[in-house]
Image: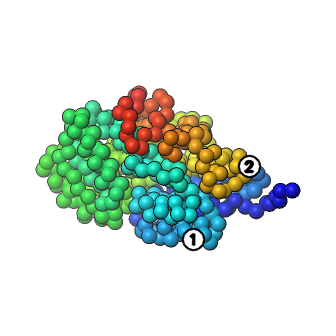
Amino acid sequence: MRKTTQAPWKVGVLFSQTGCTADIERTQLHGTLMAIEEINAAGGVRGREIRPIVYDPGAGSVPYAYLAKKLIVEDGATSIFGCYTSASRKAIIPVMERLNGLLWYPTPYEGFEYSPNVIYTGAVPNQNSSELCRFMMQTYGPRFYLIGSDYVYPRRSNRLVREFLAGAGGSVVGERYVGIRARRQDFTPIMRDIEDVGADVIFSTVVGEGTSFLYQAYADAGFDPTRMPIASLTTTEAEIEAMGFDVGEAHITAACYFAGIESPSNTAFVNGFKKRFGEASTNACAEAAYFQVHLFARALEKTNSLATDDLRPLVLGSTFDAPQGRVRINPASGHTDLWTRIGRANRRGQFTLLREVRTPVQADPFMICAEPAQLKA
Protein backbone atom coordinates (compact mmCIF):
# COMPACT_ATOMS: atom_id res chain seq x y z
CA MET A 1 0.00 0.00 0.00
CA ARG A 2 1.42 3.37 -1.04
CA LYS A 3 2.15 5.71 1.84
CA THR A 4 0.45 9.11 1.66
CA THR A 5 1.73 12.36 3.13
CA GLN A 6 0.44 15.84 3.82
CA ALA A 7 3.92 17.34 3.93
CA PRO A 8 4.23 20.57 1.94
CA TRP A 9 5.83 20.77 -1.48
CA LYS A 10 9.04 22.72 -0.93
CA VAL A 11 10.27 25.04 -3.68
CA GLY A 12 13.16 27.50 -3.82
CA VAL A 13 12.79 31.21 -4.59
CA LEU A 14 15.86 33.27 -5.51
CA PHE A 15 15.23 36.92 -6.33
CA SER A 16 17.37 39.79 -5.06
CA GLN A 17 15.59 41.98 -2.56
CA THR A 18 18.71 44.12 -2.08
CA GLY A 19 21.26 45.46 -4.54
CA CYS A 20 21.07 47.31 -7.84
CA THR A 21 18.38 45.11 -9.44
CA ALA A 22 16.16 44.88 -6.35
CA ASP A 23 13.35 47.08 -7.74
CA ILE A 24 12.50 44.69 -10.56
CA GLU A 25 13.43 41.44 -8.79
CA ARG A 26 11.20 42.33 -5.86
CA THR A 27 8.24 42.41 -8.25
CA GLN A 28 9.25 38.94 -9.50
CA LEU A 29 9.32 37.72 -5.91
CA HIS A 30 5.86 39.19 -5.38
CA GLY A 31 4.50 37.55 -8.55
CA THR A 32 5.88 34.21 -7.38
CA LEU A 33 4.45 34.49 -3.87
CA MET A 34 1.08 35.67 -5.17
CA ALA A 35 0.74 32.60 -7.39
CA ILE A 36 1.74 30.29 -4.53
CA GLU A 37 -0.81 31.93 -2.24
CA GLU A 38 -3.54 31.52 -4.87
CA ILE A 39 -2.75 27.84 -5.32
CA ASN A 40 -2.62 27.19 -1.59
CA ALA A 41 -5.91 29.05 -1.02
CA ALA A 42 -7.52 26.74 -3.59
CA GLY A 43 -6.39 23.65 -1.66
CA GLY A 44 -2.77 23.36 -2.76
CA VAL A 45 -1.60 20.55 -5.02
CA ARG A 46 -3.18 17.20 -4.17
CA GLY A 47 -4.18 18.67 -0.85
CA ARG A 48 -0.64 19.75 0.02
CA GLU A 49 0.46 23.36 0.21
CA ILE A 50 3.41 24.76 -1.72
CA ARG A 51 5.95 26.12 0.75
CA PRO A 52 8.45 28.65 -0.67
CA ILE A 53 11.95 28.77 0.79
CA VAL A 54 13.05 32.32 0.01
CA TYR A 55 16.64 33.59 -0.01
CA ASP A 56 18.03 36.99 -0.99
CA PRO A 57 21.16 36.54 -3.15
CA GLY A 58 21.84 40.28 -3.47
CA ALA A 59 23.09 41.54 -6.82
CA GLY A 60 26.15 39.29 -7.27
CA SER A 61 26.13 36.05 -9.28
CA VAL A 62 28.21 33.97 -6.82
CA PRO A 63 25.55 33.90 -4.06
CA TYR A 64 23.01 32.55 -6.55
CA ALA A 65 25.08 29.43 -7.21
CA TYR A 66 25.75 28.88 -3.50
CA LEU A 67 22.10 29.32 -2.56
CA ALA A 68 20.88 27.10 -5.41
CA LYS A 69 23.07 24.29 -4.09
CA LYS A 70 21.83 24.93 -0.55
CA LEU A 71 18.21 24.79 -1.66
CA ILE A 72 18.63 21.46 -3.42
CA VAL A 73 21.04 19.69 -1.09
CA GLU A 74 20.04 21.03 2.34
CA ASP A 75 16.45 22.21 1.90
CA GLY A 76 15.26 19.55 -0.53
CA ALA A 77 13.81 22.08 -2.99
CA THR A 78 14.62 20.77 -6.48
CA SER A 79 12.49 23.33 -8.34
CA ILE A 80 13.80 26.88 -8.05
CA PHE A 81 12.00 30.01 -9.25
CA GLY A 82 14.49 32.79 -9.73
CA CYS A 83 17.17 34.91 -11.40
CA TYR A 84 16.90 38.19 -13.24
CA THR A 85 20.28 38.82 -14.86
CA SER A 86 21.86 36.42 -17.33
CA ALA A 87 24.94 36.39 -15.12
CA SER A 88 22.95 34.92 -12.23
CA ARG A 89 21.22 32.42 -14.51
CA LYS A 90 24.52 31.24 -15.97
CA ALA A 91 25.94 30.90 -12.45
CA ILE A 92 23.07 28.64 -11.42
CA ILE A 93 22.79 26.39 -14.48
CA PRO A 94 25.87 24.20 -13.73
CA VAL A 95 24.46 23.57 -10.25
CA MET A 96 21.03 22.67 -11.62
CA GLU A 97 22.54 20.33 -14.21
CA ARG A 98 24.90 18.63 -11.77
CA LEU A 99 22.22 18.10 -9.10
CA ASN A 100 19.34 17.64 -11.59
CA GLY A 101 17.24 20.52 -10.32
CA LEU A 102 14.83 22.57 -12.40
CA LEU A 103 15.24 26.35 -12.73
CA TRP A 104 12.20 28.40 -13.73
CA TYR A 105 13.58 31.60 -15.31
CA PRO A 106 11.04 34.45 -15.82
CA THR A 107 13.16 37.15 -17.46
CA PRO A 108 13.69 38.24 -21.08
CA TYR A 109 17.21 37.25 -22.15
CA GLU A 110 19.59 37.07 -25.10
CA GLY A 111 18.68 33.56 -26.32
CA PHE A 112 21.14 31.09 -27.85
CA GLU A 113 20.96 28.78 -24.87
CA TYR A 114 19.36 25.47 -23.99
CA SER A 115 19.45 23.43 -20.81
CA PRO A 116 17.30 20.42 -19.92
CA ASN A 117 17.28 21.82 -16.39
CA VAL A 118 15.75 25.22 -17.22
CA ILE A 119 12.23 26.30 -18.16
CA TYR A 120 12.52 29.72 -19.82
CA THR A 121 9.38 31.85 -19.48
CA GLY A 122 10.80 35.26 -20.46
CA ALA A 123 11.00 36.53 -24.03
CA VAL A 124 13.85 35.75 -26.43
CA PRO A 125 15.05 38.12 -29.21
CA ASN A 126 12.61 36.99 -31.91
CA GLN A 127 9.80 37.87 -29.50
CA ASN A 128 10.97 41.36 -28.58
CA SER A 129 14.19 42.90 -29.92
CA SER A 130 13.69 42.12 -33.63
CA GLU A 131 10.23 43.66 -33.63
CA LEU A 132 11.35 46.65 -31.57
CA CYS A 133 14.19 47.38 -34.00
CA ARG A 134 11.86 47.07 -36.97
CA PHE A 135 9.28 49.40 -35.40
CA MET A 136 11.85 52.01 -34.37
CA MET A 137 13.45 52.10 -37.83
CA GLN A 138 10.07 52.55 -39.51
CA THR A 139 8.87 55.18 -37.06
CA TYR A 140 11.97 57.19 -36.09
CA GLY A 141 14.83 56.38 -38.46
CA PRO A 142 17.77 54.02 -39.12
CA ARG A 143 20.55 55.51 -36.95
CA PHE A 144 20.81 53.67 -33.62
CA TYR A 145 22.97 54.45 -30.60
CA LEU A 146 23.37 51.39 -28.34
CA ILE A 147 23.76 51.73 -24.56
CA GLY A 148 23.98 48.73 -22.24
CA SER A 149 25.12 47.49 -18.87
CA ASP A 150 28.47 45.78 -19.13
CA TYR A 151 27.67 42.08 -18.88
CA VAL A 152 26.56 39.19 -21.05
CA TYR A 153 22.92 40.05 -21.81
CA PRO A 154 23.41 43.59 -23.18
CA ARG A 155 26.51 42.70 -25.19
CA ARG A 156 24.96 39.64 -26.82
CA SER A 157 21.64 41.38 -27.38
CA ASN A 158 23.36 44.31 -29.05
CA ARG A 159 25.26 41.93 -31.32
CA LEU A 160 21.88 40.77 -32.62
CA VAL A 161 20.73 44.38 -32.99
CA ARG A 162 23.81 45.17 -35.07
CA GLU A 163 23.14 42.17 -37.30
CA PHE A 164 19.49 43.14 -37.73
CA LEU A 165 20.33 46.75 -38.61
CA ALA A 166 23.01 45.68 -41.08
CA GLY A 167 20.49 43.49 -42.90
CA ALA A 168 17.71 46.10 -42.82
CA GLY A 169 19.67 49.12 -44.01
CA GLY A 170 20.18 50.68 -40.59
CA SER A 171 23.41 51.61 -38.82
CA VAL A 172 24.96 51.81 -35.37
CA VAL A 173 26.35 55.31 -34.84
CA GLY A 174 27.65 54.63 -31.33
CA GLU A 175 27.89 51.88 -28.72
CA ARG A 176 28.72 52.34 -25.05
CA TYR A 177 28.61 50.18 -21.92
CA VAL A 178 28.45 51.18 -18.27
CA GLY A 179 28.92 49.21 -15.08
CA ILE A 180 25.86 47.52 -13.65
CA ARG A 181 26.10 49.93 -10.70
CA ALA A 182 26.45 53.01 -12.93
CA ARG A 183 25.41 56.38 -11.50
CA ARG A 184 23.74 59.36 -13.11
CA GLN A 185 26.98 61.17 -13.92
CA ASP A 186 28.25 58.14 -15.86
CA PHE A 187 25.66 58.83 -18.56
CA THR A 188 26.41 62.54 -19.01
CA PRO A 189 29.34 62.10 -21.45
CA ILE A 190 27.31 59.52 -23.36
CA MET A 191 24.53 62.08 -23.84
CA ARG A 192 27.09 64.53 -25.24
CA ASP A 193 28.35 61.87 -27.63
CA ILE A 194 24.81 61.12 -28.82
CA GLU A 195 24.30 64.79 -29.56
CA ASP A 196 27.60 64.95 -31.47
CA VAL A 197 27.05 61.89 -33.69
CA GLY A 198 23.33 62.35 -34.22
CA ALA A 199 20.98 59.43 -33.70
CA ASP A 200 17.38 58.60 -34.46
CA VAL A 201 17.02 56.02 -31.68
CA ILE A 202 18.77 55.27 -28.40
CA PHE A 203 18.55 51.51 -27.87
CA SER A 204 18.96 50.61 -24.20
CA THR A 205 19.83 47.34 -22.52
CA VAL A 206 20.76 49.07 -19.27
CA VAL A 207 19.40 47.22 -16.22
CA GLY A 208 18.78 47.92 -12.54
CA GLU A 209 19.17 51.33 -10.95
CA GLY A 210 21.20 52.50 -13.95
CA THR A 211 18.00 52.57 -16.00
CA SER A 212 16.62 55.47 -13.98
CA PHE A 213 19.91 57.34 -14.22
CA LEU A 214 20.03 56.87 -18.01
CA TYR A 215 16.58 58.37 -18.53
CA GLN A 216 17.27 61.18 -16.06
CA ALA A 217 20.51 62.04 -17.86
CA TYR A 218 18.56 62.03 -21.14
CA ALA A 219 16.08 64.52 -19.66
CA ASP A 220 18.95 66.65 -18.30
CA ALA A 221 20.38 66.83 -21.84
CA GLY A 222 17.13 68.32 -23.12
CA PHE A 223 16.44 65.65 -25.72
CA ASP A 224 12.91 65.21 -27.12
CA PRO A 225 11.50 61.66 -26.78
CA THR A 226 8.92 62.31 -29.48
CA ARG A 227 11.80 62.74 -31.96
CA MET A 228 14.60 60.52 -30.58
CA PRO A 229 13.22 58.20 -27.89
CA ILE A 230 14.96 55.57 -25.83
CA ALA A 231 13.83 52.13 -26.98
CA SER A 232 14.27 49.39 -24.41
CA LEU A 233 13.79 45.70 -23.73
CA THR A 234 14.43 46.13 -20.01
CA THR A 235 12.43 49.22 -19.00
CA THR A 236 9.19 48.08 -17.39
CA GLU A 237 6.56 49.78 -15.27
CA ALA A 238 8.83 49.18 -12.27
CA GLU A 239 11.69 51.22 -13.75
CA ILE A 240 9.30 53.97 -14.91
CA GLU A 241 8.03 54.28 -11.34
CA ALA A 242 11.59 54.49 -10.02
CA MET A 243 12.72 57.20 -12.46
CA GLY A 244 9.55 59.31 -12.33
CA PHE A 245 6.55 59.16 -14.66
CA ASP A 246 7.45 62.49 -16.27
CA VAL A 247 10.99 61.30 -17.05
CA GLY A 248 9.80 58.07 -18.63
CA GLU A 249 7.00 59.59 -20.67
CA ALA A 250 7.04 58.92 -24.46
CA HIS A 251 9.86 56.37 -24.39
CA ILE A 252 9.30 52.95 -25.98
CA THR A 253 9.46 49.39 -24.65
CA ALA A 254 8.88 45.99 -26.26
CA ALA A 255 7.44 43.37 -23.90
CA CYS A 256 5.10 40.40 -23.93
CA TYR A 257 3.00 42.01 -21.21
CA PHE A 258 1.94 45.47 -20.06
CA ALA A 259 -0.16 46.19 -16.99
CA GLY A 260 -2.77 48.01 -19.10
CA ILE A 261 -3.78 44.97 -21.19
CA GLU A 262 -7.57 44.70 -21.19
CA SER A 263 -8.68 41.18 -20.34
CA PRO A 264 -10.47 39.49 -17.42
CA SER A 265 -7.34 37.49 -16.63
CA ASN A 266 -5.16 40.60 -16.43
CA THR A 267 -7.73 42.58 -14.47
CA ALA A 268 -7.76 39.84 -11.84
CA PHE A 269 -3.96 39.74 -11.81
CA VAL A 270 -3.52 43.51 -11.47
CA ASN A 271 -6.19 43.85 -8.79
CA GLY A 272 -4.82 40.90 -6.82
CA PHE A 273 -1.27 42.25 -7.04
CA LYS A 274 -2.29 45.69 -5.80
CA LYS A 275 -4.41 44.25 -3.01
CA ARG A 276 -1.54 42.06 -1.83
CA PHE A 277 1.42 44.40 -2.33
CA GLY A 278 0.01 47.92 -2.35
CA GLU A 279 -0.01 50.28 -5.32
CA ALA A 280 3.01 48.74 -7.06
CA SER A 281 2.33 48.12 -10.76
CA THR A 282 2.65 44.76 -12.44
CA ASN A 283 5.17 44.29 -15.26
CA ALA A 284 6.38 41.66 -17.74
CA CYS A 285 8.94 40.13 -15.36
CA ALA A 286 6.45 39.86 -12.51
CA GLU A 287 3.82 38.40 -14.84
CA ALA A 288 6.17 35.66 -16.08
CA ALA A 289 7.16 34.90 -12.48
CA TYR A 290 3.45 34.55 -11.69
CA PHE A 291 2.28 32.34 -14.53
CA GLN A 292 5.25 29.97 -14.37
CA VAL A 293 4.25 28.93 -10.84
CA HIS A 294 0.79 28.02 -12.11
CA LEU A 295 2.35 25.96 -14.91
CA PHE A 296 4.51 24.23 -12.32
CA ALA A 297 1.51 23.46 -10.10
CA ARG A 298 -0.50 21.97 -12.97
CA ALA A 299 2.36 19.66 -13.90
CA LEU A 300 2.90 18.73 -10.25
CA GLU A 301 -0.78 17.83 -9.93
CA LYS A 302 -0.30 15.26 -12.69
CA THR A 303 3.05 13.84 -11.61
CA ASN A 304 2.65 13.93 -7.82
CA SER A 305 6.44 14.21 -7.86
CA LEU A 306 8.97 17.03 -7.66
CA ALA A 307 11.64 14.94 -9.39
CA THR A 308 12.86 16.89 -12.43
CA ASP A 309 12.76 13.79 -14.67
CA ASP A 310 9.08 13.32 -13.79
CA LEU A 311 8.05 16.98 -13.82
CA ARG A 312 9.74 18.41 -16.90
CA PRO A 313 8.08 16.14 -19.52
CA LEU A 314 4.67 17.24 -18.21
CA VAL A 315 5.68 20.92 -18.35
CA LEU A 316 6.77 20.73 -21.99
CA GLY A 317 3.83 21.47 -24.25
CA SER A 318 1.65 22.71 -21.38
CA THR A 319 -0.45 25.87 -21.67
CA PHE A 320 -1.87 28.48 -19.31
CA ASP A 321 -4.22 31.44 -19.73
CA ALA A 322 -1.78 34.02 -18.38
CA PRO A 323 -2.54 37.74 -17.93
CA GLN A 324 -0.80 38.41 -21.28
CA GLY A 325 -2.90 35.74 -23.05
CA ARG A 326 -2.55 32.00 -23.50
CA VAL A 327 1.10 30.91 -23.28
CA ARG A 328 2.68 27.57 -24.09
CA ILE A 329 5.94 25.92 -23.08
CA ASN A 330 7.45 25.01 -26.43
CA PRO A 331 8.44 21.31 -26.22
CA ALA A 332 11.25 21.76 -28.75
CA SER A 333 13.24 24.25 -26.68
CA GLY A 334 11.85 24.57 -23.15
CA HIS A 335 11.15 28.24 -23.92
CA THR A 336 7.71 29.85 -23.96
CA ASP A 337 5.53 30.96 -26.84
CA LEU A 338 4.59 34.53 -25.86
CA TRP A 339 2.81 37.64 -27.11
CA THR A 340 4.83 40.45 -28.71
CA ARG A 341 3.78 43.99 -27.86
CA ILE A 342 5.23 47.50 -28.21
CA GLY A 343 4.17 50.29 -25.89
CA ARG A 344 4.88 53.96 -25.20
CA ALA A 345 5.21 55.14 -21.59
CA ASN A 346 2.61 57.68 -20.54
CA ARG A 347 2.17 60.17 -17.69
CA ARG A 348 0.41 57.59 -15.51
CA GLY A 349 3.50 55.39 -15.41
CA GLN A 350 1.83 52.83 -17.69
CA PHE A 351 2.33 51.95 -21.35
CA THR A 352 0.00 52.93 -24.16
CA LEU A 353 -0.16 49.97 -26.54
CA LEU A 354 1.13 50.79 -30.03
CA ARG A 355 1.47 47.36 -31.66
CA GLU A 356 0.68 43.76 -30.73
CA VAL A 357 0.59 40.36 -32.38
CA ARG A 358 -2.63 38.58 -33.33
CA THR A 359 -1.38 35.23 -32.00
CA PRO A 360 1.48 34.17 -29.68
CA VAL A 361 4.96 34.17 -31.22
CA GLN A 362 6.72 30.83 -31.16
CA ALA A 363 9.93 30.96 -29.15
CA ASP A 364 12.94 30.76 -31.47
CA PRO A 365 15.94 31.12 -29.12
CA PHE A 366 18.47 30.27 -31.83
CA MET A 367 16.89 32.61 -34.42
CA ILE A 368 16.39 29.81 -36.93
CA CYS A 369 13.19 31.25 -38.42
CA ALA A 370 13.55 34.70 -40.00
CA GLU A 371 9.82 35.42 -40.41
CA PRO A 372 8.72 38.54 -38.48
CA ALA A 373 5.76 38.56 -36.13
CA GLN A 374 2.54 39.96 -37.57
CA LEU A 375 2.04 43.12 -35.52
CA LYS A 376 -1.11 45.21 -35.72
CA ALA A 377 -1.70 48.77 -34.55
How was this image coloured?
rainbow
Q: For marks 2 and 1, give the CA distance.
A: 30 Å
| Residue 123 image position (x, y, % from top left) | 44, 45
| Residue 235 image position (x, y, % from top left) | 39, 50
* Quadrant of the rendering where the C terminus is positioned: top left
Look at mark 2 in the image and give the residue it sits on: 42
Residue depicted at 46% across the width and 35% down the height: 361
Q: In this rendering, does residue 258 appear at all?
A: no
Residue depicted at 40% across the width and 65% down the height: 20
Q: Residue furthest right?
A: 1
**Horizontal placement of 342 versus 219: left or right?**
right
Q: Residues within 10 Å of mark 2 (few under 14, many from 20)?
A: few
Q: Which mark is residue 361?
A: none
| Residue 321 image position (x, y, % from top left) | 60, 38
Look at mark 1 in the image and give the residue it sits on: 70
| Residue 27 image position (x, y, % from top left) | 51, 56
Query: Where is 64 relative to 241, above or below?
Result: below
- Please tell me in which quadrant of the rendered image residue 244 appears: bottom left
User: Sequence order check: which comes first, mark 2 or mark 1?
Assistant: 2
* Quadrant of the rendering where the N terminus is positioned: bottom right
